[in-house]
Amino acid sequence: MLVLARWGMKWAMGERREGEAFHGGWAVLGLRACFDPETAQGVSAMYEFRVGDEVFHALVQDGTIDTQHGPAQRPDAVIETDDEVLVDMAAGRTTFAEAVKERRAEASGDPAALGALYGIFRIPAPEERGIPGVG
């Protein structure tokens, strides 16, 4: 399932077409699909994500991840943004640091946990939608 999610993310995070829906909570699966266990070796942190009206969390422990819908009991770090910023980050149009600088996102909590967050997720390079060979 995670391999399929990784594959689908290449196209899902481009420009949205009219009528397409996106919910920040879908990132619960996306976080697992993009998780890099090697980079997360030695990391132990609970992250809470607030994306629009959606709240979910990820527990990263020494190269493993568990994601769940709902708030974290005791988050080490909290990340807040909206659906548009999440899509823009996943599509490579912005970074979390740029979104924070532009006040489109916020991060709070343990600086070490926030620092570890960078690099433990590998978002697949976006690709154009369409049928190969068809203009």
Image (tube, rainbow, N blue to C red):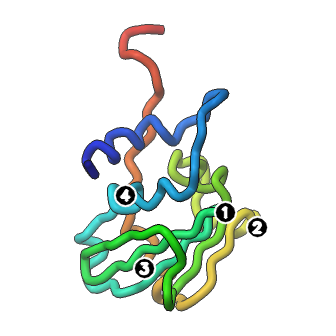
Among the two numbered marks 4 and 3 on one chain, the one whose residue lies closer to the N terminus:
3
Residue labelled with disc 2: 103
Instruction: Write down the residue under mark 3.
Output: 116
Above or below, 48 relative to 102: below
Q: Residue at x 25, y 69 (%)?
A: 37
* Label 3 crowd (10 A; few <14 / some 14-19 / many >=20): some
Q: Give the alpha-carbon distance from disc 1 to disc 2, as whole Å.
A: 18 Å
Identity, as a three-letter code, of the amino acid under mark 2: Arg
**Residue sitting at x 37%, y 39%:** 8
What percent of the width, then of the height, locates residue 109?
A: 58, 88
Q: Locate residue 78, reporting x and y percent.
A: 58, 79
Residue 36 place in picture, x, y as percent: 29, 65
The one nearer the camera, 54 or 14, is 54
The residue labelled by disc 1 is 53
Q: Residue furthest top?
A: 134
| Residue corresponding to mark 4 | 122
